[in-house]
Amino acid sequence: MNKSDQKQYFLADNLKAIGVSLLSVLGVTVLLAIIMFIFVREQEESRAKEILDNVRVVFRDAEITLDYLNALPYESCDVANLSEMRKTLFRSRFVKEIGFYQNDKLLCSTYLGILDEPIEEDKPDFYTQLDDAFWINTPLQLFDKQATGTIVKRGRYNAVLDMDSVIGYSYTQDWQLFYNGDKFYHMAGNPGLVDSTLSQEDMDARTGYFSLRFILCDERYTNTCLKVRSDHGRVLDLHMGKIVLFVFAMLMTAALTHMLTFNYLRRRRSLESRVSKGLKEHKFYCLYQPFVDLQTGKVIGCEVLSRFEDEFGPIYPDEFIPQVKEQDMTWEFTVDMITTAMKELNENPDIPEGFKVSFNLFPFDFTREGCLDLDFALGMNDKNFKLVLEITEDEQIATHSAVKHIKSLKSKGFLFAIDDFGVGYSNLSQLKTLNCDFLKIDRSFVMDMEDNSIRSSLIPHIVSIAEGLNVELIAEGVENAEQSKELKGLTIGFGQGWLFGKPQSASALAKSVQDT
């Protein structure tokens, strides 16, 4: 992968990471917003219930006060009655004034005392289901009708209620207490929040779950309801700390998601990751380079070469082979390649029986007992191919276990070739011990033939060694006719290189066989 490709992938990974981070932020934002909304809604609903609970406390206090007085035997506004009324007022928490009625006329009150002239009772605004009469925002006699208040009457007594002090002035902007019986009455709070034509259906519709507006009605005082429309400014001020944490969480999510995604994409494109994935998903494929009989020019075999390419491009053998070793997947890699090659070559009718098929194996694998499991290749050998196992010159193949395993495989019918002969570890004694069938002359010797270099002058000695060991020679890296002619003159049996064909597909190999 060149620098230009690396730069493009870097930019692409960065854009993908940004996209994922934005989606993550969006998801986290929605999730946190829902959690935040639920939390705020529960708090606001709790506050609304608290306000309504306070109203209930006021009404209940008035009930207890009035029930107590009505249970007394007083039928007139005498000193004893006034005294008891004042004592009861003192004990009450939310009643500001108590009055005594007879024949629907106010005769006396705790503050005014006995009136000189009884005051005719005004028509109540409404009666509750408990048959209590209510006057809402009615002028108070105590203040010469210069102030208003809420009055409730039961039996012979009435009570002026202290609504504002118990509910609190801090709520006056976003709540409204109202009576919604036969007729609508504003009782306390902000009078503009509720439409006076509000129906029960409207009340139900305006108390949706996805809203910070609540309409709650008291269970005992059924038509007494409270609407709360939460003030957004107050809510923001109240939860500013959480909002700051919310923004911080989004920024951290964006940064963390971008970092993790970018690193994941980089790792996914790394050599280690690509090779590992390719091994697990069988993404390696086979190409076949023909080798020919130098005397006849006929294609008589091929070397199976592994190649790899994914969505990021190709990885060349000098890059992926070390990775396969490092990941200790050499045997799995070999089995996969042999299986693929045997399947493709068997399926092609133009590949003849007895064709030499050469596989590269890792020297270290010959030290393992698992290398004896190559019987599966024999089971797939429908065309009686001559299966050649190539091993590079390596000190590991000199071990006792490697030699033992090689001999065992030869006894099963496999042929062996020493690859890149002349540049590795092998010595004459080792070659005799291994009893190989082919020596493959390293391409560097062939490439130097035209220059008559010292290296190329060693080829006749290699020929002598092969004759002494009674093995056949395959010259690698043959690129022109002059090289082929000289090799043929040295009685080297086989040649392999671009002169005879580049690594190619099985179908192209079959055509090469037919053409020769």
Image (cartoon, rainbow, N blue to C red):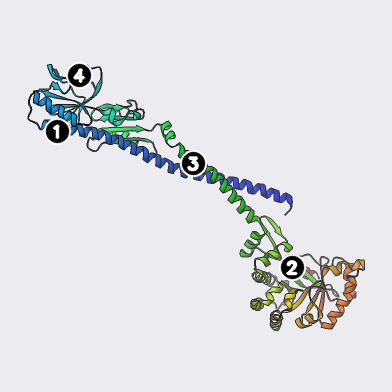
**From the image, which quarter does the C terminus lie in?**
bottom right
Q: Position of residue 400 (x, y in %)?
A: 71, 81
Disc 2 to disc 3: CB gap under 8 Å: no
SS at mark 2 in the image:
strand
Q: Distance between the residues labelled 1 and 2?
A: 107 Å
Is residue 356 visible from the viewing direction of this image?
A: no
Tell me the number on the disc at residue 245. 3
Please name the residue that numbered disc 4 is placed on: 141
4 or 1: tag closer to the N-terminus: 1
Q: Quadrant of residue 434?
A: bottom right
Tell me how far mark 4 sits from mark 3, CA to CA.
55 Å
Amino acid carrying mark 1 in the image: Asp
Kindly indicate the quadrant of the structure image that contains residue 107. top left
Tell me which amino acid carries mark 4.
Answer: Gln
- In percent of width and height, residue 161 lies at 23, 27
Cα gap from disc 3 to disc 1, whole angstroms: 53 Å
CA gap, disc 4 to disc 1?
23 Å
> Mark 1 sits on what residue?
67
What's the residue at 78%, 74% (across, down)?
A: 425
User: What's the residue type where badge 2 is placed?
Assistant: Tyr
